[in-house]
Image (cartoon, helix red, strand yellow):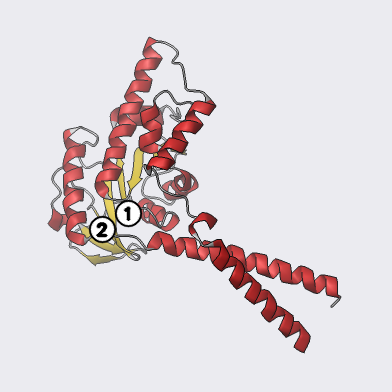
Amino acid sequence: MPLIHRLTERRRAAASFRHSFIHCTARAHMYYTHFMQDAEARRQIVEAGRRLRDRFFVASNDGNLSARLSEDRILITPTSMNKGDVTAEHLLTLDLQGRVVAGNLKPSSETKMHLAVYQARPDVQAIVHAHPPTATGFAACRIRLDQDVILPEVVFGLGKIGFAEYGTPTTDEIPNAVVKEIPDCEALLLSNHGALTVGSDVMQAYYRMEVLEMYARVRLVTRILGAPTPLTADEVGELHRVRERQGWGRKAAGIESVDPALVDLIAQIVVEIMKRKDGSA
């Protein structure tokens, strides 16, 4: 093989290794987190379920909540039960394939959606799915809430509000639609269905649902009163920077979470090994 070709292949291999190393290290960094303890996760799910019912964010047996207990275990609410009536004993432990590990009831019919989010977002520790009336109204009308921003609080509390296209409940359509949006947001509307929020624990995910519903109510009022004055792109950008500086949102995993010197050193070692391999051929 000509020298120029060998050098090109070495550079490509080193770059590929560097990218893979950063990706794997960043993913490990996200997993190196404080998973929710079983007892605390149960307590928070029960409390959040009661609040969802009391604020009429769910009716009858609507909605579902879950928490991540470990890399391969989650806790989730049962199906066919009002979330305000759920107790710690009602909750089920599942593996990431959806198999019941502990619990006597049937898990939520939207288990696939929860599992898809946990697979796509290793940093997410809890999920709340509900039908808050105003936010669900926007979802039913297929009106996005992220087209413009009128309140700083929505940026501070939610960052970006996503919008998942309609899918038939209980099928793979909803998980597939959610996975397309969830990497970049902590809250999203589910077209003709409801809303979903995530967090570092159940109560954070629940409070984000409150923020989402309040923002939807404000947007509805502005539509009744007249055209609101949205914040400019520069103003919104500054709010996102403030949010990041204050630690109110998740830190994006990537090269900044890995020591660049370590990555470069290992890449150089790989190149040297390849040189020696070529030389001995």
Query: Which residue is at the front of the view, 225 or 262?
Result: 262
Q: Secondary structure at mark 1?
A: loop
> Would you identify the image quadrant in which residue 150 lies?
top left
Q: Is residue 281 left or right of residue 50?
A: right
The residue positioned 23% from the left and 50% from the top of the image is 79
Q: Secondary structure at mark 2?
A: loop
Q: Position of residue 175 (x, y in %)?
A: 42, 50
Which numbered tag is attached to residue 87?
none
- Callout 2 amino acid: Met
The residue positioned 72% from the left and 84% from the top of the image is 277
Q: Position of residue 197 (x, y in %)?
A: 34, 42
Inspect this view and state whether residue 160 appears. no
Q: Position of residue 228 (x, y in %)?
A: 44, 15
Inspect this view and state whether residue 216 appears. yes
Tell me if mark 1 has few (under 14), some (14-19) or many (20+) residues whose alpha carbon lies within 10 angstroms of its own.
Answer: many
Q: Residue furthest bottom?
A: 280
Earlier sequence position, callout 2 versus callout 1: 2
Q: Which residue is under mark 2?
A: 36
Q: CA distance from mark 2 to mark 1?
A: 7 Å
Pick the quarter of the image with the C terminus: bottom right
Tell me if mark 2 has few (under 14), some (14-19) or many (20+) residues whose alpha carbon lies within 10 angstroms of its own.
Answer: many
With respect to residue 13, does 180 lie above or below?
above
Q: Is residue 126 left or right of residue 2?
A: left
Q: Which residue is under mark 1?
A: 125
Q: Is residue 262 left or right of residue 90?
A: right
The residue positioned 50% from the left and 61% from the top of the image is 258
Marks 2 and 1 in Cβ contact (< 8 Å): yes
Query: Which residue is at the front of the view, 85 or 41?
Result: 41
- Callout 1 amino acid: Gln
